[in-house]
Amino acid sequence: MFKPNNVGKKHLERRQPTERKRWGLLEKKKDYKQRAEDYHKKQAHLALLRSKAAAHNEDEFDYGMIRGRTRDGVLVKERETSKVLSNDAVKLMKTQDEGYIRTLENQERKYIERAKNQILFDNSGMHKKFSDAGEATVISNKPSKSTVKPSEEDTLKKLSDLKELKRRVARQRELSLLRQEVDLQRELMKKGSCVKKVDNEGRVSYKWLNVRKR
């Protein structure tokens, strides 16, 4: 019985010349055709959008104009408020915010402590030396002004460290005030009546009224 030879010839991929080896395999016609069709399809879609934009009438009525509004010619979308959170959910979110702010505040406080200790250590130039008997002797390894002069690079580094320390202190103070504000908002959401007081300096404080317990 005759059996056809199904084993065809192996067509290997055409290789690039040695000087163009970094470009990989040569592109086949089917690859170019697919790329060309995709390019022309996108160009036709862009042309259609341009024609629609050119023929668009801005004064034409649209149902989105009923609730939509613009600011300086830019459409402003309102935040979706269809889902109203409960009082307990809002208090939980406030608690999470306070915990996150407290974490950032602790990070800034630790950085400030390390930076201050490093600056004090660099300025003192003192360290302890332990003998074989275990006795500690405080000696100074700080060079005198007559022998070593601070380089310009060291001076600029110290100024940069002090500037960064000042920025961190200000940020730590802002985080502390923000944490107190969030904590106050959470307390105001609790049950009970409170009285708002403003002192002569404009600082606001709240005093909760005593509730008689049964």
Image (tube, helix red, strand yellow):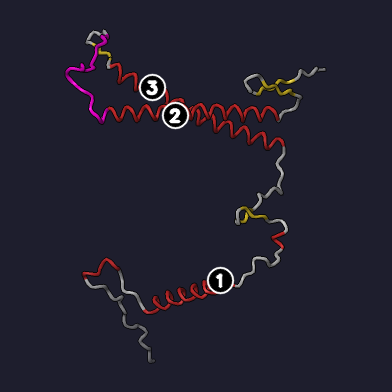
State the image coordinates of residue 186 (x, y, percent, origin top left).
66, 30
Q: Which residue is mark 2?
A: 168
- Contact, CB < 8 Å: mark 2 with mark 1? no
Mark 3 surroundings: few (<14), some (14-19) or many (≥20) residues within 10 A = some
Number of marks present in the image shown:
3
| Element assignment for label 2 | helix
Residue type indicated by callout 1: Leu
Taking 37 as reference, is 95 above or below it?
Answer: above
Q: Nearer the viewer, mark 3 or mark 1?
A: 1
Q: Name the residue: 70% across, 21% down.
A: 197
Q: Earlier in the sequence, mark 2 or mark 1?
A: 1
Query: In the figure, residue 60 lies in which quadrant?
Result: bottom right
Q: Earlier in the sequence, mark 3 or mark 1?
A: 1
State the image coordinates of residue 172 (x, y, percent, origin top left).
49, 27
Q: State the quadrant of the C terminus.
A: top right
**Foreground of the two, 183 or 206:** 206
Q: Which residue is mark 1?
A: 49
Taking 86 as reference, is 48 above or below it?
Answer: below
Q: State the quadrant of the N terminus.
A: bottom left
Residue type indicated by callout 2: Arg
Q: Which residue is mark 3?
A: 116
Q: Earlier in the sequence, mark 2 or mark 3?
A: 3
Structural distance between the alpha carbons of marks 2 and 1: 51 Å
Q: What's the magenta region?
A: 136-154
Taking 93 as reference, is 117 above or below it?
Answer: above
Q: Name the residue: 47% across, 28% down.
A: 170
